[in-house]
Image (cartoon, rainbow, N blue to C red):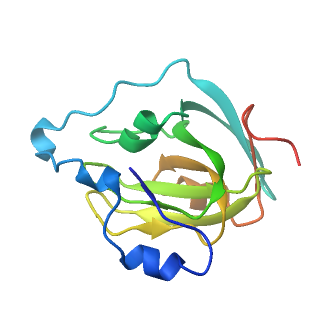
Amino acid sequence: MHLKFACGLGVGLALLAAMPVQAQLPRQDPRNCVGQPEIRPLEPLSTKTARGETWFLVEVADDPREREFGLMCRRAVAPDRGMLFVFPRADIQAFWMRNTLIPLDIIYIDARGSIVSIANARPLDERPLPSSGPARFVLELAAGRAAQLGLKPGDRIHHRSIPRG
């Protein structure tokens, strides 16, 4: 689930400020959690590292409601699947795991497709995990996939929404 914070000198203060509107989503009982259905059609996305290229099929969350709910209440994410969050502009992004039942790798990506930072998110943890710099895209993968692929800041992500840089 996405939390929005301002970019710039006020980032630290923004992280301490009252939670934004998205934080008003109620906590759900994990046994009866209801999220959004899979976003179709699935789209190809690739990661490019020193080890090579890896392909995924991703759901694309490109409107506020889809970004707000993300992978909430899902019980699994296949190793070759994920969700790409597309934002209108690059900014500090912060995600949390309210109602998210599975561990995830959260990969923050700048406007040109370069990885800014990677966070490892634990299920149901509501602490914000901010990007280390402005990100326009965020890729969520099953926990551990980023390490398996050797993803690191500076590596590239390719998708139709990301300009080639």
Q: Quadrant of residue 3?
A: bottom left
- Residue at x 55%, y 42% (from the top left corner): 85
- Residue at x 46%, y 24% (from the top left corner): 39
Camera-side residue of 19 and 66:
19
Give percent across and percent down for residue 24: 24, 52
Q: Is residue 55 left or right of residue 53?
A: left
Q: Is residue 71 left or right of residue 109?
A: left
User: In the rendered image of this protein, does residue 153 appear above or below residue 108?
Assistant: below
User: In the rendered image of this protein, does residue 39 appear above or below residue 85?
Assistant: above
Viewer can see residue 71: no
Outermost residue to the right: 165
User: In the rendered image of this protein, does residue 11 appear above or below residue 134?
Assistant: below
Number of numbered markers: 0
- Residue at x 61%, y 72% (from the top left corner): 132
Viewer can see residue 91: yes
- Residue at x 61%, y 58% (from the top left corner): 108
Give percent across and percent down for residue 9: 60, 81
Camera-side residue of 159 and 128:
128
Q: Is residue 32 left or right of residue 42?
A: left
Q: Quadrant of residue 32?
A: top left
Give percent across and percent down for residue 74: 31, 37
Q: Is residue 13 left or right of residue 86?
A: left
Give percent across and percent down for residue 128: 39, 67
